[in-house]
Amino acid sequence: MSGLASRADRARGLCLPLGGLLVAEAAARISGLDSTTLAAPSAIAGAGARAALDGSLFAATAQTLGAAFAGLVIGVVLGLAAGIAFGLVRPLDRLMEVTVELIRPVPPVAIIPILIIVSGLGFRTEVTTVAFACIWPALILSRSAVRGVEPRLIEVSRALRLSPLARIGKIIMPSILPNIVVAVRLSVGFALIVAITVEMTANPVGLGYAMIEAQQALDPALMLAVLLWIGGIGWALNALLLLLAARVMGAAARQAPSP
Amino acid sequence: MSVSRLAWIAASALVFCVIVAAWQQAADARVFSPVFFPGPDRIWSALHRGWTQGDLAARTATTLGHMLVGWLLASVVGVALGAVIGLSPLASAYLKPTLELLRPLPASATIPVAIALLGLGESMVLAVIAFGAVWPMLVGTMHGVQSVEPRLLEVAHALGMPRRRVIRDIALPSAIPDILAGLRLSLTVALILTAVTEMMAGGDGLGAAILDAGRLMRSANVFAGVAILGLIGMAGAMLLSILEARCLRWRLAS
């Protein structure tokens, strides 16, 4: 019964996207669309296929994902380090409170112009901006998770005379792992957004620049094809991370906050 | 607020002042090039000059306007759509898959499309901000409405309450905590997208101002603009947490 109902629901869910596609295609065919802003779905698919065949789409994807991933790793590692330090040493956390709360609300993209001055238009600017955006979720989630670690575990580690590093590696890290996964999930979304933004404003490579180039070349089919491709990447990354989260934490992962 | 808490805040403010003073010393000693990192004194004078003689105040107002209007648009659409999807399984079946397809789309990637469709004007800026900021609100409202105490809905049903009143008097009030959480996340997203779209579209907001200043290597002006953007973000978050405390007082009381 539930299988039947969910099949009907699935069919209903497909109505809007498929209907929209058909209407768009029909409207474009009937009106003989020749626009600089819109394109028929078939033209978009054609442009996407051409970009995929000549390899430019995948080269741009590699550039974008490479920079996003590099920034993500740097940001999450820095955020984790600071978060664990702040969680373990309360006075440090309290002393840095004003500084952190003053820097945190700065929108990550606002530091792009600063980085343009410091490191020019390029890869380093992109990675640094992504890293800046990814520090905060890791810092905040790991800080509160460290405070929530079962105190008896800490006592055990004291009784065993574990060194501080061993304590972090053997007790703290395993028990805050689920929060780290949530932080990474949040950060991946940010990383992709920020990477594409930087490519549009300050680092003329990758998918962000590919979209701008297509828009300025008045090639709406290619522009929309890249947009859909980016959406597909975002969707695939999210699905991948959900899978990862489910493996790490079980079914509770599905309730985790989404970006 | 306890005395020790105040003391810690004072101490941490002192730490911040020490950092700024060290930065000033380093800038005076030319540890790093003043072209890259201006000292706090130069940033302050850029702020002061821009605010009193330049157009910094007007630009801040423009940016605030973009952010607030885009955010309001997103809030209205997000709460309405979230309530409909949360309350009606049929609407959810038709709409949710499409929304799930749109949601992972990085908002900044929609900027070139929005520019192609709407040009470089205000409507483009607002559309991009609203599109990006709508998701936290939509998800929050949906979740809040779906987790309404079922007995309340049964009572409403038994009383023969019309659907509109069920939404207004039961579903939305009990979804308020989730809606507020969505509002807060959306505001952050709205500020980020305001800065990005202003950078892309030019015009007279702060985003365009700092990008232009960056390209002209006027680092003090860049830092001044970034500081204002940070203050806007901080003020927004503080106002919302005050609002949250107000709105949720009845929850604590009951």
Image (tube, coloured by chain):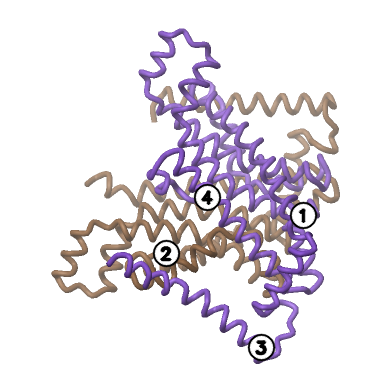
Chain colours: A purple, B brown
Whether residue B47 can be seen here? no
What percent of the width, then of the height, locates residue B66?
61, 62
Residue highlighted by disc 1: A59
Residue highlighted by disc 4: B236
Determine the chain carrying the residue at label 2. Answer: B
**Marker disc for residue A29:** 3
Cα separation between marks 1 and 2: 40 Å
Residue highlighted by disc 2: B79
Q: What residue type is labelled 4?
A: Gly
Q: Are marks 2 and 4 on the same chain?
A: yes
Q: Quadrant of residue B207?
A: bottom right
Cα separation between marks 4 and 1: 40 Å
Q: What residue type is labelled 3?
A: Arg
Residue drawn at x 75%, y 39% is B43
Q: Which amino acid does label 1 sit on?
A: Ala
Cα separation between marks 2 and 4: 19 Å
Observer-nearest of B35 and B181: B181
Secondary structure at numbered mark 1? helix
What percent of the width, then of the height, locates residue A190?
60, 49
Q: Are marks 4 and 1 on the same chain?
A: no
Q: With respect to residue B144, does A163 lie above or below?
A: above
Determine the chain carrying the residue at label 4. Answer: B
Observer-nearest of B233 and A182: A182
CB contact under 8 Å: marks 4 and 3: no
Cα separation between marks 3 and 2: 36 Å
Secondary structure at numbered mark 4? helix
